[in-house]
Structures are given as C-alpha cells and as structure tokens.
Image (cartoon, helix red, strand yellow):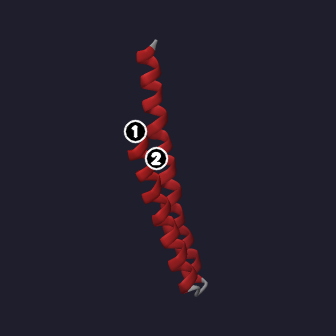
Amino acid sequence: MGEMVEKLKNIYTWWFMIFVIFIGFFNIYVDGRILQSRKNKKEAKISKGIGWVYVISALGVYMVLY
C-alpha cells in the first residue's frame, strides 16, 4: 500500500511541476509577445520578469519540499 502511495505522489509531483513550468513559460513568451506587438516594451519586460520569477520560485519550492 505504501509503495502505491509513493508512486502516486511521484506522478502527482511531476505533473504539478510540468503544469507550473508551462504556466510560467506561457506568461514569459505568449504574454510578452502580445505586449510587444502592442508596442508596450516596458510592460513586456515586466511580464517576462514575472514569468521567470514564477518558474524559478516554483522550482525552488519543489527543491525545498522534496
């Protein structure tokens, strides 16, 4: 029983990290490109910075907790 719980925990952890990284990269590239196309260079840089902070902090939390 404990072995099955560990497998499920590992699967859940990997899917969570993939989801977090996907959301971060979505914010970095897609939102940044939309803002650049509207000529909002400053907002695009801020959006990309927030996306990188999101990805790095999620990876940091993952490393601390697991």
Residue for point 48% across, 72% down: 49
Give the residue type at disc 2.
Ile
For mark 2, give the secondary structure.
helix
Residue at 40% x, 38% y is: 66
Name which of mark 2 and mark 1 comes first in the sequence: 2
Q: Nearer the viewer, residue 57 or 21?
A: 57
Estimate how packed mark 1 is, as few (under 14), some (14 to 19) or many (20 or more) residues with alpha carbons within 10 Å: few
Tell me the CA gap for discs 2 and 1: 15 Å
Pinpoint residue 26: horizontal percent, then vertical percent: 52, 61
Q: Which residue is mark 1?
A: 66
Q: Nearer the viewer, residue 36 or 59?
A: 59
Please tell me how crowded label 2 is: few (under 14), some (14-19), or many (20+) other residues with Cα within 10 Å. Answer: few
Q: Nearer the viewer, mark 2 or mark 1?
A: 1
Q: Which residue is mark 2?
A: 18
Rendering coords of residue 8 (x, y %): 47, 26
Q: Mark 1: which secondary structure? A: loop
Q: Residue at x 42, y 31 (%)?
A: 10
Q: Residue at x 40, y 17 (%)?
A: 3
Residue 65: x and y in percent read: 43, 41
